[in-house]
Amino acid sequence: MRNLQLVVVAVFAFSLIQTGASQCDVVRLTAAVYETLSPFMTEMREDLSRIESKVDSLSGDIEEHKNKTATELSMTVTTVHSELERNVLTNVTKELKKTADYILEEVPTSFVCGGTRAW
């Protein structure tokens, strides 16, 4: 910010010199511009500091939210995976029972273990 203030003052001084102002006028007017800019530059530095603080705070919030979201997502994936496993096992068990019932009821005894059921 201080560099910006100095650049503005330097450009102003150069403009005064280009217009043919006396050295005394250049120094006096440049000092006045510098003094006029000082409160604005201080205010800009304070604003910048507040903005940086907010950005830091938001960065922390974003990181916290990201970690929370990752944890929730992991828990959801684990839950879905467990639910799928349970559903698959339930469906496979049902299908195996249907197949076993079909074999016991529909398949002639002569096809199972040479005429006798082994189970």
Image (cartoon, rainbow, N blue to C red):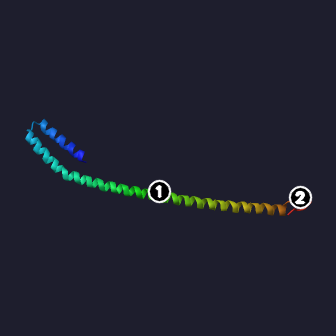
Q: Nearest the camera: 32 or 108?
A: 32
Mark 1, mark 2: which one is toward the viewer? 1
Q: CA distance from mark 1 to mark 2?
A: 61 Å
How busy is the neighbourhood of tag 2: few (under 14 within 10 Å), some, or many (20 plus)? few
Three-letter amino acid code of the residue under disc 1? Lys
Q: Earlier in the sequence, mark 1 or mark 2?
A: 1
Q: Residue at x 16, y 50 (%)?
A: 36
Three-letter amino acid code of the residue under disc 2? Cys
The reply, left or right, for residue 63 in relation to residue 75 is left
Q: Which mark is residue 27?
A: none
The reply, left or right, for residue 19 in relation to residue 5 is left
Element at label 2? helix
State which quadrant residue 110 falls in: bottom right
Q: Residue at x 23, y 54 (%)?
A: 43
How many numbered circles does the render carry?
2
**Residue 83 place in picture, x, y as percent:** 63, 62
How busy is the neighbourhood of tag 1: few (under 14 within 10 Å), some, or many (20 plus)? few
**Residue 72 place in picture, x, y as percent:** 52, 60
Q: Which mark is residue 113?
A: 2
State which quadrant residue 21 falls in: top left
Q: Residue at x 9, y 36 (%)?
A: 20
Q: Which mark is residue 66?
A: 1
The reply, left or right, for residue 55 in relation to residue 113 is left
The reply, left or right, for residue 58 in relation to residue 118 is left
